[in-house]
Amino acid sequence: MPKGTPFNYNLITSTFGPQEDAMSTSKVSDILSQLQNSSSSPPQKITSLLSSAKRELLTLDALLPRPTTPSPVLLLARQTLETGALLSIRLQQPDAFTRYYQQLLPFYEIPDSSYQTSTNDLKSQRSKVTGLYLLLLLTKGDYAGFHTVLEGLEVEQAGKGKGLEGDEFISYPVKLERWLMEGSYDRVWGATKRDGVPSEEFGVFSEVSQLPIPVLIGTIRDEIASCSEKAYPSLPIANAKNLLFLESEGSVVGFAQGRGWVVKDGRIYFPQQQDDMRTEKEILVASGQVIENTIGYARELETIV
C-alpha cells in the first residue's frame, strides 16, 4: 500500500487463508468457547487458555487489524480480546485488563460493517469494556485519564448524532465521578451495591478485599480522609472508625499512620495545614459538609457490617 494511503476496511474479505490459518482459526474458536464457559475454572486454567488463544491469533497475524485480515478472523480476534478483558476483571487482574483494553482500541476504530455479521450474540462488548476501564481509572484516582477517555467518547458519539446518557455501562462511572466531585458519598455507596451495578464485572469494584484491583470503598475513604483533614483539628478514633468505613480501631490506627496522622490518647490529630488560617465559621461550614455527606451511609454501613 503506498505511503499515505488511508486504511481501507472494505479490502477485508471473508475468505480464510491457507489450511494452517484455518486450523489456527478453529483452535481459537474452540478456546473461546471454553473461556466463555469458564466461570468456575481455576484462574491458572483461564490464564493458560487466554495465552493459547493469543498465540494462535499471533499465528494468524490478527493481534492487530490489517486490510488483509479476513472478516471472520477479525471478529474472532476482537471477541477473544474482549473475553480476556472481562475475565481479567473477574480475576482481579487490573494490569492485564488494561493491556487487553489497549489492544482492543484498534479494533474499535473499525466500522461495525467491516465485521460482516448480523448475529446479535457477536456484537461488540466495547461499551462494557470501556465502562469498566473508566471505572478502573476512577477508583485509581486518575481523573485526568478518566476525562480524556470520556471526552473522546463524547466527540465520537456527537459525530454520530448520539449521546452517552442511554448507555448503562458508560453512564455508571460518569454518575459515580460526578457524585464523588459533589461529595455525595451516600449516593456513591448506594450505587456500588450489587443491585446497583450494570453487570457482574462492575460489582468487582465494590468488593472489599486485599486483592490488587482498587475498590470504590477505598476511593470514598480517601475522599473523606482529605475532607476530614481540612475540617477538623482532631477526631476520636471511635468516630473515625465509622466515618472511614473501617472495621476496627486497630485499622483506624494503621490507616492514620499511613497518612501521617498523629494518634494519641484515643484521638487522631491531623497535621496543621500551612494555609490553615480559617475563621471559626469556615471550619464549621467545612465540618458540616463532611458530616452531612457521610453520617448517613456510615450508619448504614454499621448495619451491614
Image: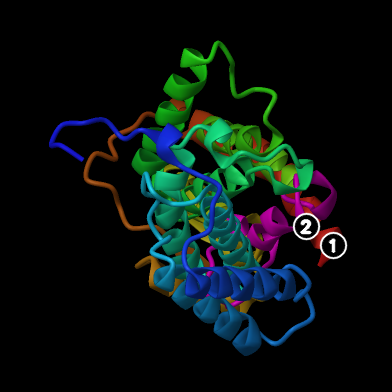
Answer with left or right where residue 239 lies relative to residue 101: right
Taking the view exactly as shown, the residue that stands out farthest to the front is 18
Taking the view exactly as shown, the residue that stands out farthest to the top is 161
- Mark 2 touches mark 1? (CB < 8 Å): yes
Separation of disc 2 and disc 1 at Cα? 5 Å
Answer with left or right where residue 139 lies relative to residue 62: right
Answer with left or right where residue 271 lies relative to residue 163: left
Pinpoint residue 257: horizontal percent, then vertical percent: 41, 74
Under mark 1, the amino acid is: Ile
Magenta stretch containing residue 212, yes or no? yes
Q: How many marks?
A: 2
Residue bearing mark 1:
304
Pinpoint residue 91: horizontal percent, then vertical percent: 62, 74
Please name whichever residue, 129 or 37, is drawn nearer the observer in this view of the structure. 37
Residue at 53% x, 63% y is 214
Residue bearing mark 2:
301
Answer with left or right where residue 270 lies relative to residue 186: left
Q: What range of the chain is rendered magenta?
A: 192-217
Q: Can you say which quadrant of the picture contains the C terminus?
A: bottom right
Magenta stretch containing residue 109, yes or no? no
SS at mark 1 in the image: helix
Under mark 2, the amino acid is: Leu
Please name whichever residue, 287 or 103, is drawn nearer the observer in this view of the structure. 103
Please name whichever residue, 198 or 262, is drawn nearer the observer in this view of the structure. 198
Residue at 52% x, 28% y is 285
Indicate the quadrant where residue 262 lies: bottom left
Residue at 53% x, 54% y is 219
SS at mark 2 in the image: helix
